[in-house]
Amino acid sequence: MFRGLLLEKGEGGFGARLAEIDESRLPGADLADVLVQPEYSTLNYKDALAITNRAPVVRAWPMVPGIDGAGTVLESAHPDWKPGDRFVLNGWGVGETHWGCLAERARLKGDWLVKLPAAFTPRQAMAIGTAGYTAMLCVLALESHGVVPGDGEVLVTGASGGVGSVAIALLAKLGHRVVAVSGKPDAADYLKSLGAAEVLDRAAFTAPGKPLQKERWAAVVDAVGSHTLANALAQTRYGGVVAACGLAQGLDLPASVAPFILRGVTLAGIDSVMAPKARREAAWQRLARDLDATLLERIASEVSLDFAIAKAAELMEGKVTGRVVVRIA
Ligand code: NDP
């Protein structure tokens, strides 16, 4: 038996509880070839949606949530993994269609796992989580477009969130001048402590704007979508690039093609869930090299598995800043 969160849906409706689960209920070895002990998991926005049943994140019932995990391999039939190896897992539909890591045991595909970089403990890896790994994917996209420090200011939207916080820390350490957009006036000191040179009020971005505006940004990391992304595109300098990864304001993109056809701006889409393994490994290696791990203490708070359901509800109410790690054992 192992302890884990269990989400169930039946005639009685939806339920989320901390349960004692028989190991025989884990997905079979034919579906997943590595048995792991997650030491830490995390609450991403998507996890909170699943645990509170606010959106159809879960597509198979019952479900153990937890799209991220870091810990130790217990058993493996996969050639790359042996007992005792340390892993990190992000996405691949885990916690959505496949039982996830908010539990003392998970059975996962070896192909999904990435070696935990020596620079990080499992707790630090989960302080980064999908949000931080996505921030790194955004930075890699800017770099592959040729953006280098000194090119000009880089804008980060949704700044006080998980993606935004890690993006600021990474870009500032790499030597970029980072400008943060936030709706939380009292988060300015926090954002500057991560490396933001300036903090702008998000009200100037969330309202509809002109299709072409004064050119300012060499590059943008956008976690917000909707009018914010449209305004960021309209303010991006000739030949600049905008990495779009989120929808905190909305799924829509009320923009024009003007920035693309008149300024040669590139819109780079970022997906973390199905990103190929080589890109994940590159992202985690770069996180190990370029992220100041001491900042993670400022970004992340911790709860035990016993309080994860209550914390997910708080997250849905917008009461949480930064990242939440979940201690499993
Ligand atoms: P968080 O909830 O931690 O942060 C989102 C931030 O966006 C908030 O902190 C807030 O920042 C800002 N925000 C919230 N609501 C609004 C609004 N209505 N209008 C404008 N800004 C708003 O989420 P994450 O950082 O973990 O994720 C950010 C986004 O990226 C989410 O939409 C998430 O679904 C998506 N995502 C996508 C991934 C991918 O693979 N493409 C992977 C991971 C996340 P502030 O108060 O500072 O303005």
Image (cartoon, grey):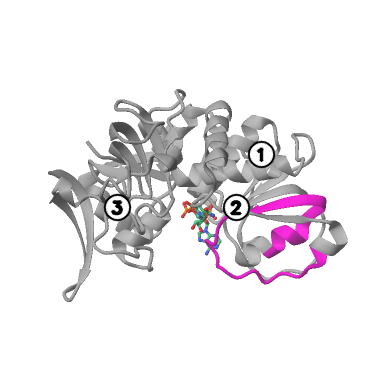
- The mark lying in front, picked from 3 and 2, is 3
Label 2 amino acid? Answer: Ile
Relative to the observer, which residue lies in front, 53 or 31? 31
Q: Position of residue 178 (x, y in %)?
A: 67, 41
Q: Quadrant of the N terminus?
A: top left
How far separated are the C-alphas under marks 3 and 2? 24 Å
Crowding at dot 1, Cα within 10 Å, few <14 / some 14-19 / many 20+, comes out as some
Q: Tell me which segment is drawn in magenta.
A: 230-259
Task: Say if residue 285 shows up in the picture.
Answer: yes
Q: Position of residue 37 (x, y in %)?
A: 26, 36
- The mark lying in front, picked from 3 and 1, is 3
Q: Position of residue 276 (x, y in %)?
A: 54, 45
How far separated are the C-alphas under marks 1 and 2? 25 Å
Mark found first going from the N terminus, 1 or 2? 1
Q: Quadrant of residue 151?
A: top right
Vertical placement of 226 versus 325: above or below?
below
Q: Secondary structure at mark 3?
A: loop
Label 3 amino acid? Answer: Trp
Which residue is denoted by mark 3 in the rendering?
Answer: 99
Q: Which residue ends up furthest to the right in the rendered image?
A: 262
Q: Quadrant of residue 255?
A: bottom right
Q: Which mark is residue 15?
A: none
Q: Is residue 252 magenta?
A: yes
Crowding at dot 3, Cα within 10 Å, few <14 / some 14-19 / many 20+, comes out as many
Q: Is residue 166 left or right of residue 11?
A: right
Q: Is residue 188 magenta?
A: no
- The mark lying in front, picked from 1 and 2, is 2
Q: Is mark 2 within 8 Å of ligand 1?
A: yes
Which residue is denoted by mark 2 in the rendering?
Answer: 270
Q: Which mark is residue 197?
A: 1
